[in-house]
Image (spheres, helix red, strand yellow):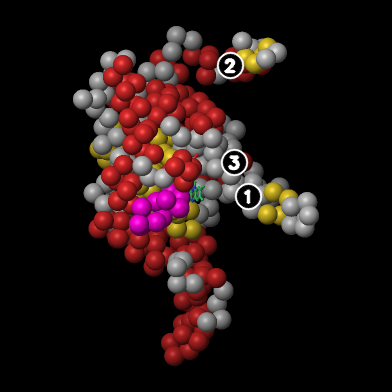
Amino acid sequence: MTDLTTNYLGLRLRSPLVASAGPVTGNPALWQRLEAAGASAIVLPSLFEEQIENEAWAMSFASDLGADQFGEALSYLPAFNQPDVGPARHLALVEQARELLEIPVIASLNGTTPGGWVRYAKHLAEAGAHAIELNLYDIVTDPQVTAADIEHRYVELVEEVKAEISVPLAVKVGPWFTAFGNLAHRFEEAGADGLVLFNRLYQPDIDLDTLDVVPRLSLSTSAEIRLSLHWMANLFGTVKCSLAASSGVHDGADALKLLLAGADVVMTTSALLQHGPEHLEVMERFMRQWMTERDYDSVDELRGSVSRGNVPDPQVYERANYYKVIHSWAPGGHR
Ligand SMILES: Cc1cc2nc3c(=O)[nH]c(=O)nc-3n(C[C@H](O)[C@H](O)[C@H](O)COP(=O)(O)O)c2cc1C
């Protein structure tokens, strides 16, 4: 029997197929289906800096008013007063997931600026999370802020969150960095036990009828694994921390390519939204069959075997690939 077990953040997982943060992992009614279909861990949706800061603001506002007016004060407060959002519900979700699931539960925290919200990493761990994923999603538009400022702030945040917790820490980022190899090493030095590569940018659109700027959520396609694949292959063997691939993982073939490039686990959200939790079974079946046909006994055996350090011509993962690829175009498709 092919051994699919893998190590991620120091956790031994039954396979590399992890359900990443999104509506499916945020729905307790689907958790056991995910587990039964073969998810080896789940990442819960992020608790956002704004949710925590809003609650902190509400509490200080209420204490200024006096406890007797607190209930009344809450009714004036905006969106965060809804019962289904906020840190308390989130902590309860982590506890519930721990009760219902055998597989590891990873809690996610999203934020970009230093602040008291960072302490919630500790609360999420105390609620039972096996690990914390710090989701550093940001859109920097201030022309006074430099790339170095942002990287410095992110590295500090990783240090701050790490100092709060005794469980492992993964750091999830987007791909928009000039020298990502350098940043990856700095994250590791700051205490990251794993890197999740990459988050997707959700760009808004313009409605030509109303001229409104509208959010547009489009799910990924398999073509998007290439960015993660590229960085898995370049980082494998150069960092000690775990590597998780995210974005574009839709089938067993995507998963295998990322493992060959160097991923310890692959994460999927869009495919689960499109096909439901049972899609994980289809992915696992494909992986097992492919590995059996090629005499791979384990994931450990194939991981990283097509990484930059393990291919005859490492330049395929460097600039040379750019030159080759643009000269490979021929009418009717690639040569
Ligand atoms: C509707 C939706 C909600 C998401 N919510 C979160 C979230 O709360 N935290 C997070 O880190 N990523 C979140 N993501 C991003 C996914 O975890 C994942 O990184 C991204 O969708 C790329 O993976 P995919 O190609 O498998 O979809 C969300 C994605 C979608 C589509």
The residue positioned farthest toward the bottom in the image shown: 68
Q: Is residue 333 above or below residue 159?
A: above
In terms of depth relative to the viewer, which is nearer, 168 or 207? 207
Neighbor class of circle 2 (other Cα within 10 Å; few <14, some 14-19, many 20+) is: few
Mark number for residue 216? Answer: 1
What's the distance in space between the residues labelled 2 and 1, CA to CA? 32 Å
Residue 27's image quarter? bottom left
Nearer to us of marks 2 and 3 is 2
In terms of depth relative to the viewer, which is nearer, 51 or 207? 207
For disc 3, the marked residue is: 148
Is 29 one of the magenta-colored residues? yes
| Mark 3 or mark 1, earlier in chain | 3
What's the distance in space between the residues labelled 3 and 1, CA to CA? 30 Å
Whether the residues at callouts 3 and 1 have beta carbons within 8 Å, the answer is: no
Neighbor class of circle 1 (other Cα within 10 Å; few <14, some 14-19, many 20+) is: few
Q: Is residue 136 left or right of residue 91?
A: right
Nearer to us of marks 3 and 1 is 1
Which amino acid lies under the numbered mark 1 shown in the image of this protein? Arg
Q: Position of residue 296 (x, y in %)?
A: 28, 18
| Mark 2 or mark 3, earlier in chain | 3
| Mark 2 or mark 1, earlier in chain | 1
Which amino acid lies under the numbered mark 3 shown in the image of this protein? Ala
User: Can you say which quadrant of the picture contains the C terminus?
Assistant: top right
Q: What's drawn in magenta, residue-wise? A: 20-30
Q: Is residue 35 left or right of residue 24?
A: left
Q: Is residue 312 left or right of residue 325?
A: left
For disc 2, the marked residue is: 321
Residue for point 49% across, 64% down: 51
Q: Is residue 55 above or below residue 132?
A: below
